[in-house]
Amino acid sequence: MKAPSLIGRIATGRRLSAGLADGRLLAAAAALALSLAALPTAACFIDGRALSLVEDINGAREIYVVRPGGEITTQAARYTVLRVIKGDGSIAVGETIERAAVPMGLLVHAKRLMLFHHAAGYWDVRPTGMLEKFVDAVLALPAAGPDDVDAWRVRLEFFLPYLNFMDITVAQAAEQEFSKAPYRALLALRPLIDRQRVLARLARPSLTDQELQTKLTLLAVSGGPADAAAIAPLIEERWQKYRSDSLATLLATHVELTGLDGLALIEQRYLRDSDRQQSEIEAALRALRFHLRETSSKVPAEAALATLRVALERPRLAPLVIPDLIEARDWQALPQVVALAHSQDMHTQWIRERVLEYLHACPLPDAKAAVAMLEAAPFAHASE
């Protein structure tokens, strides 16, 4: 859940214009993925990788399909332009581009993207063979804002078949699209998600964090309480070893699958366990925030709030959750916050500042009285 990377926003279907023909988007994307063997071989390496492939494609001012010409060395090389996908007219088909030669299938440099077509075996690289068509299709996709349900449906249906694609750059681009999508969009994808395949992929031991988080998100959307058993060993392993990698997504998914039982696990194993590391506590809180803020979650926001309030019982955790309580305008926590105001832990400035923020925000009379008491009391610094 990226916020933790549970994600989604979706609605009615559309068709791609331009690069993709008639028929449902999902079928078109699957057919495009299966056309791999018919395309020229290429490799996939990105210079200065920072953005996702999709962001590179959309952000590029120039996109060319090129073929290396002459001897390939580590020095500057010439590339003949076979096709101009996007450009300003300064470079035409048949002209050459000079750049340092590197064995790659795709190069992004200074807003210029080049797709390399070459004969099989020309370089000793893994083939991908579909970058040109993939770029065409991505450019035809509609842009999607945070609340643009229709556009997200089009994009997610297109990228869904690429989540397990053989080319890692394309697969990662699809994963990043899913990580950015609002959760409500993903919920509408449920009929298209192969739950058994998701479970099979989750059982593989070699998933990257991004792969794991994407598969967990798909399971949260398509699965039910019985599927929590598939991720229980992953949560247990992290708990035993004090690990926090992908923990927020694991816990958020577990809550989405099991409801109140998942919240109870977070409360008992993380909020009440004084042995937990700071990174584990923060991951557990990120999972709770997802269910607090996401109106499409299967867990009521009030249930997530009640679990957050448990952290107030441990003064050193209180500053981590008080901003969330203020954001949710949860004034039910006032008695616990006032109790903190009277505790010895108020000698810690970090706790004192957060408590005062809550009391100033709360409109109830008891909050005003507590503010007056605190502001009149001397403050003694204490070490954390």
Image (tube, rainbow, N blue to C red):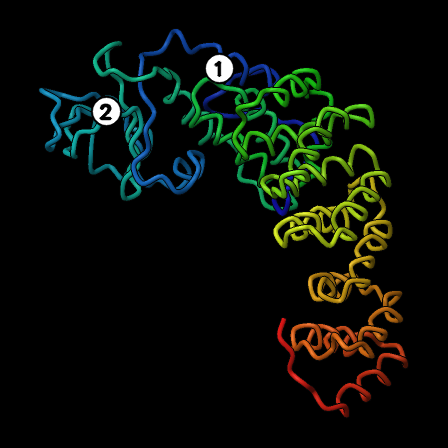
User: Badge 2: how crowded within 10 Å, few (<14), some, or many (20+)?
Assistant: some
Kindly indicate the quadrant of the structure image that contains residue 261. top right
Q: Is residue 8 visible?
A: no
Residue beneath label 1, please?
33
Residue beneath label 2, please?
103
Quarter of the picture containing the N terminus is: top right
Residue at point 68%, 40% (across, down): 239
Tell which of 172 and 65 is nearer to you: 172
Residue at point 74%, 65% (across, down): 318
**Left or right position of 54 against 248:** left
User: Badge 1: how crowded within 10 Å, few (<14), some, or many (20+)?
Assistant: some
**Left or right position of 369 against 115:** right
- Point out residue 40 in the picture as x, y percentages from the top left corner: 31, 12
- Residue type at numbered disc 1: Ala
Q: Are marks 1 and 2 in contact (CB under 8 Å)?
A: no
- Point out residue 301 in the picture as x, y percentages from the top left corner: 83, 50
Q: Which labelled disc corresponds to residue 347?
A: none
C-alpha gap between disc 1 and disc 2: 23 Å
- Residue type at numbered disc 2: Pro
Tell which of 110 and 319 is nearer to you: 319
